Amino acid sequence: MFLRTIPVPLFGKAFAPNYHVRELWLERHYTFYNLWDRMQHAASVQVFAADCYFGLIAMLLNALPAIEFEHGLEVAQEVFGSAIDMLQRNNESEAANWTIPREPLERQFPLFLGLQANDCAGASFRVYVYETKRFSLGSVFCSAGQWGVEVLLHRFFASGSCRTWNPDEADLFLVPDYRACHIHLAPNYQHKGLTLLEGDDYHSQVIRNHKDKYRRAEEAESSFLGLIQSLPYFDRKKGMDHIFIFSDQGFIVNFTHTFPSWRDHIPHSIFLTTEAFTPGCGPGCFSPWKDAVIPGHIDLDRMERIRSFNQPSSNRSLLFNFHGRLPVNHDYYEKVGVRRALLQFAELPDVSVGGFIEEYFEVMGSSHFCLIPEGTSSWTNHLYESFFAGCIPLILSDRYVLPFQDLIEWPSISIRWPQEAVSLDLYMYVKDLVQTRRPLVEAIKKRVDEHACWFDFYRFDRHCSPYRGVVHDLEQRHRRMPKYLHPHHWML
């Protein structure tokens, strides 16, 4: 019999303290999958349902990511449909002392599973979405965290009214690839908490065929080449109508260049990227004429939790804040000068600066400004989180290329301060703004709240959503695109 203490699905960082350790997270889903698999082979669904009805529903939902990995999207859709049907037939879960949150079932799972139709934010183009099989496996699992944009954009266009199954009708071709998710799934040596195979210091005995679930960093280049070689319509226009998504640091994922020879293979393709300044490559890996910057994904529960602490300006007691990775708490940031410079504010009154803290969301919602410093690359999800806290972004990253510049008047909702000039002058500047120009600060804060919709991947308003921003950028690039690059011969 299932215990009522089995946790139910909730895709957010509050779900488990080891959320950021992806192989541990996946192992947890495979624990439920193995129960489901045994139940299937024993043909004992009815027995399980009679014994613990809501326990069975919780098991199905928790097993979904692993079911998709093992059996594909269609089976995962069927299992999800079965769980929803069971809940509709008996929705007394709370009376039975089970807590099964409805919001993820209504807003997240249908999106991740490709069950939520949309109008493509009014797109004027037609898009062909490739079936890339192993390259886009695990949409439910890979939807979590900032890299979830790989999944969200895939599912948006795959379920959108602008999708065409006829390549001859297509204006653009989307190439789904959960690159960042799959590379970050690579296990570490003797990882604490992982149920290791006997005699194997890396792989889980709970995750089936664990070695096949991730991409090895040393094979990133050959993997990308294999993806391109699988695209039958790529050579029609030498790839210039093909869209690739980059959700980490441009071509860099986990400090690995995923495609060093990209200039030989996809130089003309469209890159939708969170980072315009790939470390080690610089501006050469991004062309503003064909590429576009996109925001990182924020999990729905995290976003709404941040929103819950969004205070009016009159209730905010802090001038500014920053909490996260710094040279004093993370080796990778030892040479990041702007983050080291932030430490000078740690002991000043009316600010909150330091490492990770439990009350981070509350601090953001109590601050007039959120500092957005450069990290190991120019972009950071701190920027987009600040909007849901109603915290005016104070950007300290000179190379940060901001998204949706045709649609967002960034100087009206943020401040950009030279990252090499972080000193007490910054503190005094903000203090003066808050104390002597309060109406201006309140007006900017109001505009920040109004612009949060541009970074909410669970919003489908064709007037304000990240999808509208992406569609707008693609429309601009499609209009400028030549009909052909290296055409076949023609004669009179």
Image (spheres, rainbow, N blue to C red):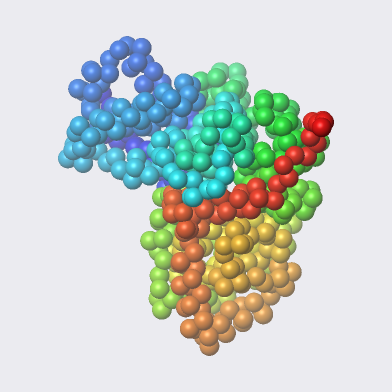
State whether residue 33 is above or below residue 411.
Answer: above
- Point out the image quarter for the N terminus: top left
Which is more toward the observer, 151 or 66?
A: 151
The answer to whether 128 appears left or right of 482 in the picture is: left
The answer to whether 355 appears left or right of 250 in the picture is: left
Q: Residue at x 53, y 88 (%)?
A: 436
Q: Position of residue 87 (x, y in %)?
A: 24, 34
- Point out the image quarter for the C terminus: top right
Q: Position of residue 449 (x, y in %)?
A: 45, 67
Outermost residue toward the front in this view:
492
Q: Position of residue 412 (x, y in %)?
A: 57, 73
Q: Position of residue 268 (x, y in %)?
A: 75, 42
Which is more toward the observer, 230 or 324?
A: 230
Tell me if residue 47 can be seen. yes
State whether residue 42 is above or below residue 432.
Answer: above
State whether residue 43 is above or below residue 27.
Answer: above
Tell me if residue 324 can be seen. no
Determine the image quadrant of residue 80: top left
Outermost residue toward the bottom in this view:
436
Q: Residue at x 73, y 45 (%)?
A: 482
The answer to whether 295 appears left or right of 16 in the picture is: right
Determine the image quadrant of residue 199: top right
Which is more toward the observer, 188 or 199?
A: 188
Q: Residue at x 71, y 26 (%)?
A: 229
Q: Residue at x 59, y 58 (%)?
A: 404
Q: How many marks?
A: 0
Which is more toward the observer, 331 or 236?
A: 236
